[in-house]
Structures are given as C-alpha cells and as structure tokens.
Image (cartoon, rainbow, N blue to C red):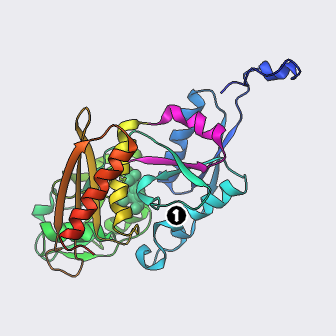
Amino acid sequence: MLASPASPAFSPLAEVPNLSKFVIATRESRLALWQAGHVQSLLQARGHPVGLLGMTTRGDQILDRSLSKVGGKGLFVKELEVALEEGRADLAVHSLKDVPMDLPEGFQLACVLEREDPRDALVSNRFDRLADLPAGSVVGTSSLRRVVLLKALRPDLRIEPLRGNLDTRLRKLDDGAYEAIVLAAAGLKRLGLAGRIRQVFEPQEMLPAAGQGALGIEVRRERADVTRALADLAHQPTWLAVAAEREVSRAMGGSCSMPLAAFARFKQANELELHAAWGDPEAADGGLLRVQVSGEVGELAQAVALGSAAAAQLRAGGAR
Ligand SMILES: NCc1[nH]cc(CCC(=O)O)c1CC(=O)O
C-alpha cells in the first residue's frame, strides 16, 4: 500500500514507502495471543509494522456459567470491537468459531485465513480412544454440539460441563475431574500441545462447528486501508467453505447456543460438500439429524445458497 502517486503539490515525503502501523486488538489467552502474533508476523513479513493491544473480555471473565446462558459468543468480541470503534486498534483477530453470524453495524470480516485442522480431538490421561472409555466415564465439554455428537457415539457416558481457556481445561482434566475431554485440534496444535491429543475425530463421527479451525479478521467498514493490507492473507477456499457453514448457523437462528454442527470442504476444484447436523441435548442418544448437500461453488453467493439449502433440510427434518 504505497502512497498513491499524488499531485506534485504533495510533500516529497509522500514518495517514501510509507506503510502505516497497525494495532491488533486481541484477547489475552495464550491461544488468542498466538493467533494475533501469527497475523502480526504475516503482516510484518509484508512490510507493515504491527503492534498488539491485549484485552480481557467478558467471555474470559465468566467461567462459572455456560456461555450459552449468559450471552453467547459475542461476549468474546465486544470489547475488541469497542477498541476498533474508538480507534485504539485497527483490526481484531478471532477464532472464527467464536464470531457471531451477524456483526454489529459498521464492522466486517475483512478476511479469513487458511484453515488449520478443523477436527475435534479427544484428550485423556488414561484412554487412547473414546471407544475405550468404560461406561459411565465422565467426559468434559460445555459445547451443546459436542454433547449431542458424543451422545450419538457413546450414550453411556456422563457428560459434564467444562469451561475456561485451553490451559484451564487441560488443568481440570489433569486434576482428575474428567476421564477425557474434547477440544478443537487446531487450538492444541497452535499452542504446541498436539502431543496431548489421543484421538482425532474424523468429521463424519464428530462434525466440527461452523468456522472451526479458521481465523477471521474483523475491521471497521470504513477502514479500506486495513482491508487492502489484509487481502494478501485471505484464503479463498476457506472463505467459501466457512461462508457456507456460517450460513447454516445464521439460517438456524444465528446463536452459538444451538446443538448445531456444520462443516464444508472442497471435493474437487469447484465442488463444495457441506455437512450439517442438529441434535437434541435432552435425548439420551443426542437425537441427531444429519444432512449433506454439495454443489459448484466459485463465489460467495453460491456458498451461501448451499448453506441455506442445508438449513432448509435440517428444518424439514424437524430441527427447530
Ligand atoms: N470455543 C472456544 C474455542 N474457540 C476456538 C478454539 C480453538 C479452535 C478453533 O480455532 O476453532 C476454541 C477451543 C476449543 O473449542 O477447543
């Protein structure tokens, strides 16, 4: 983003490659700081000086109640958005999974980076596979999606709430409160904790959440300068896949407190395959309804249409 060829009346300084400094607003969990640092180095490699502004969000503070009861995933992004609005920061890096389907007026997702491993993983100090857990074992997760998918695989387990950042969840496992816990493989890998993974679930057995494993960058709409600088970091296949997944969520009501999974991947160059699942947390077996759609997707509108089609099938199957 060099200074534009200005009129000769401009100062000679305008000819100096003058890349403005960007500030990234980030939560202060180890994972959030890794993700912000990752975007920082990608931008710096392209010549932009980048600083970080660490912040604590409501979502980080509330650890005793299920997020779905206290306001949902927006709790993790609100403070960062205020920093963008007040000009204290220029961009915010998020786990896309934690970003609400509709951003507040004035904000946009400027880009989505290439996805890391989208799968869920089993972490345990005693068992190598979910199938090895004895009946009645306690498994930790607070995600309604993981609850229904776990129940479908193993209706005989006891699923108990587990919140907190990755390190907190691992500590609670190590303290002996659970036989096993389920976490996103992406977060563990990013923090160098892949060695704790015992089993990685294939999407057909435990379908990931919309956007899982992908990083999204949020900016104020009027910041065309930031959006331009970010264009180089975007990964189009990931962008289209997560657009389809997020449309399923949006069409089903847009809240994170739904027992909903959505995962899309390109089968051939232009053929996007989208899987979605909806469950009933009260049902002993998770009450799963699974749908699959696929179609040619080369642009955003086609990805969104695929997401709507999957949501329509879920509703036709009885998901509310
Ligand atoms: N809901 C918390 C959350 N948000 C993003 C990740 C890391 C994985 C990702 O980037 O999707 C995690 C941890 C987890 O689900 O285990």
Query: What residue lies at 42% left-to-right and 64% top-to-bottom?
Result: 168
Instruction: Judge whether residue 221 is colored magenta.
Output: yes
- Please give the name of the residue rendered at 26% of the width and 43% of the height, measured from the top-left corner: 265
Nearest the viewer among 127 and 72 is 72
User: x%, y% of residue 215?
Assistant: 45, 47
Check the image and report above or below for 158 versus 153.
below
Does residue 298 appear in the picture of this structure?
yes
**Residue at 36% across, 69% down:** 172
Is the C terminus in the top left, top right, bottom left or bottom right quadrant?
bottom left
Residue 319, above or below 309:
below
Q: Quadrant for ligand 1?
A: bottom left
Residue 73 versus residue 10 in the image, above or below: below
Q: If the image is split into quadrants, where does the N terminus sit?
A: top right
Examine the structure image and report whether residue 293 is included in the region drawn in magenta. no
Disc 1 crowd rating (10 Å Cα; few below 14, some 14-19, many 20+) is many
Amino acid on which the number 1 mark rests in the picture:
Phe
Residue 19 location, quadrant: top right
Numbered circles on residues, count: 1
Q: Is residue 247 left or right of residue 138?
A: right
Please give left or right for residue 228 compared with residue 34 in the image: right
Q: Pinpoint residue 78: horizontal percent, then vertical percent.
A: 58, 64
Which image quadrant for residue 147? bottom left
| Residue picked out by circle 1 | 76
| Residue 31 shown left or right of residue 120 in the figure | right
Highlighted magenta segment, given as a residue range: 213-234
In the foreground, 197 or 111: 111
Q: Tell me if residue 193 can be seen.
A: no
Position in image of residue 65 (x %, y %) = 44, 79
Residue at position x 57%, y 33% in the image:
43
